[in-house]
Amino acid sequence: MSHPDTQMFPYPYSPLPCLFYMLLFAHLISPGRCHQHSGKAASTGGDKLAEPTTVKDLLNSEKQFEKNLENVEPGFFKHSAAAQRTLFHTAPGVVFAERNIAAQYYEDDKNGNAVLVYATAHLGVHNIIVMGHYGCGGVAAAVTSTVTSEKDAAKDPIEAWIWPIRYIYLNSKSDSFRAEITALRTKNKELKTISAPALNDTGYKALVEENVKANVQRIHKSKAAMGHKGPKASIYGWVYDIATGDIKDLGVTVSFGK
C-alpha cells in the first residue's frame, strides 16, 4: 500500500521520517474502478490477498498481514519501527492513497482537494481514512520547534505546515484536553534543548492522536466535503503503531453526502 519515506525528516531534531497521509480506498464500493493503479503482487506467506468490502475487513487484512509477516520474518515489527513500514494484506488498487508530512489536510491545498474530490466523485470511494502513526517526525518537529505564533511559522514552509500541530501542543490544558500533552510541554519548559520525544512517550502519542482527530474535522468541514452531492462518505481517524503493527481506531468517525 505504501512505502516509508526515503529521506529523513529535514530537521536535525527529528530522528524519524514522517510517514503519512489521508488515505482513501475505492474497491470497497466499486471493484474494477481503480485497475489503472493495480498490478500483480505475491501475497505474504502464500495466502490469497484479501478483497475487503468494509472498513472492518480492511483492519482484519492488516491483522492477517501482521500474522503472516511475523511467521515469515520473526521480529519484523520490532525492526520496522525505525523504517516505518505499514501494509495491508490486500491486492494492489484496493487502496487509493494521498500522502504527506504528518497527515495534514488544508482547505487551500489543491492537491489534497483534488484527491478528495476525484476519489469521492469519480472513483466511488465512500471511506476516507486519516492515518497517522506513532513516532511521526512531523509531530516530533512540532514538539521541538521554538515557534510560538502562526505569523512566525509562516516564515518557514515546514514550520507553516506543522503549525496546526504546534498549536495543539502549545494550547492543550490538563483540565480540558489531553493531560499527557500538557505534561510533555511542562517537562520541556525545563530543558534548554528539546529533543524529539521517545517513541512511547505518552504525550507524544497523544499529540499524534489529536492531530489525526483535527484533520478528520478539517476534511469534514471542507468545501469539498460540504459540496459533495454523491453517496455518503465516512471519514475515519486511525493511528498505526510502527512498533507492533497494530492500528488504533480513534472513534471519531463522521460522514458527509447523502
Image (cartoon, helix red, strand yellow):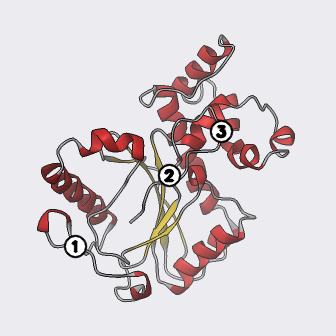
The image shows residue 217 at horizontal and vertical percentages of: 60, 54
Q: Nearer the viewer, mark 1 or mark 2?
A: 1
Task: Please name whichever residue, 202 or 6, is drawn nearer the observer in this view of the structure.
Answer: 6
Seen at 72% across and 43% down, the residue is: 163
Seen at 33% across and 39% down, the residue is: 243
How far is disc 3 from disc 2 in space, using C-alphas? 15 Å
The image shows residue 165 at horizontal and vertical percentages of: 65, 41
Mark 1 lies on residue = 42
What is the crowding at mark 2: few (fewer than 14 residues within 10 Å), some, or many (at least 20)? Answer: many
Q: Quadrant of the N terminus?
A: bottom left
Tell me the tag on residue 207. Answer: none
Tell me the tag on residue 11. Answer: 3
The image shows residue 222 at horizontal and vertical percentages of: 67, 65
Q: Amino acid at mark 1?
A: Ala
How far is disc 1 from disc 3 in space, using C-alphas? 37 Å
Q: Amino acid at mark 2?
A: Leu
Task: Please name whichever residue, 208 or 20, is drawn nearer the observer in this view of the structure.
Answer: 20
Seen at 67% across and 15% down, the residue is: 189
Label pair 1/2, CB-CB below 8 angstroms:
no
Tell me the tag on residue 19. Answer: 2
Q: Earlier in the sequence, mark 1 or mark 2?
A: 2
Seen at 50% across and 54% down, the residue is: 5
